[in-house]
Amino acid sequence: MVTRIADANFLLRLITKTPKDHYEKARDLAQALEAAGGAIEVHPVHVAEALYVLEGRIYNVPPEEAAKALLMLLESRPFKPREAPALLNALRRYPHSGLDFPDVFLAELALGEEKALLTFDQKLKAYFASRTRNLP
């Protein structure tokens, strides 16, 4: 199985469909990998970068829409996100958390691995505590 690793720019081309020639090339590469049974790995740092760019002054996409677009992309084939449970949970919770995405991801990673979270950030502590109360 052929596996490639995508950067934020690749993700942004698929989400924004701009510039058109880059979008078409990215789409074609993703379709070819899927047809061949391959995968596109995505690291959480590149998801954070893509969110930052989407929400920034160039695209000005609201956090809810940016997270939803990335979530839809990463849950489709041939995408294979690293740290998938934590990453996907973070994308679902981030827009309404009041925190930066990296903090939500870190909390979700710690929760998934049943580890304590070390931080002096009071908002992050509160988020983490609220999520640990919801554990089975």
Image (cartoon, rainbow, N blue to C red):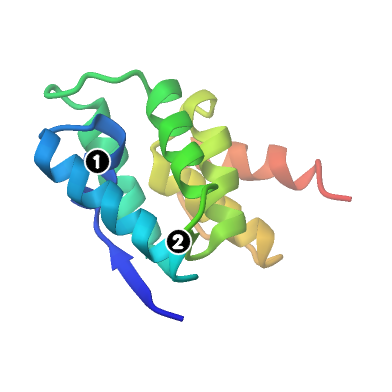
Q: Residue 135: x percent and y percent?
A: 82, 49
Q: Is residue 12 above or below residue 118?
A: above
Mark 1 or mark 2: which is in front? 2
The residue that mark 1 highlights is 12
Q: Is residue 95 above or below residue 104?
A: above
Name which residue lies at 50% across and 44% down. 104
Q: Residue 69: x percent and y percent?
A: 42, 32
Q: Amino acid at mark 2?
A: Glu
Q: In 3D space, how far apart are the residues under numbered discs 1 and 2 (Cα atoms)?
A: 19 Å
The answer to whether one can see residue 29 in this image is yes
Instruction: Give 125 or 61, whichever is nearer the viewer.
Output: 61
Instruction: Give 41 or 17, whichever is nearer the viewer.
Output: 17
Q: Residue 55: x percent and y percent?
A: 26, 26
Q: Quadrant of residue 2?
A: bottom left
The answer to whether one can see residue 117 in this image is no
Q: SS of the residue at dot 2?
A: helix
On the picture, is 135 further left or further right than 53?
Answer: right
Name which residue lies at 56% across and 47% down. 88
Q: Farthest residue to the right: give it.
A: 136
On the picture, is 80 further left or further right than 8?
Answer: right
Q: Quadrant of residue 70?
A: top left
On the picture, is 30 further left or further right than 74?
Answer: left
Name which residue lies at 31% across and 68% down. 5
Q: SS of the residue at dot 1?
A: helix
Q: Amino acid at mark 1?
A: Leu
The residue that mark 2 highlights is 34
Q: Quadrant of residue 126?
A: top right
Mark 1 Cα within 10 Å, few/some/many (few <14, many 20+)? many
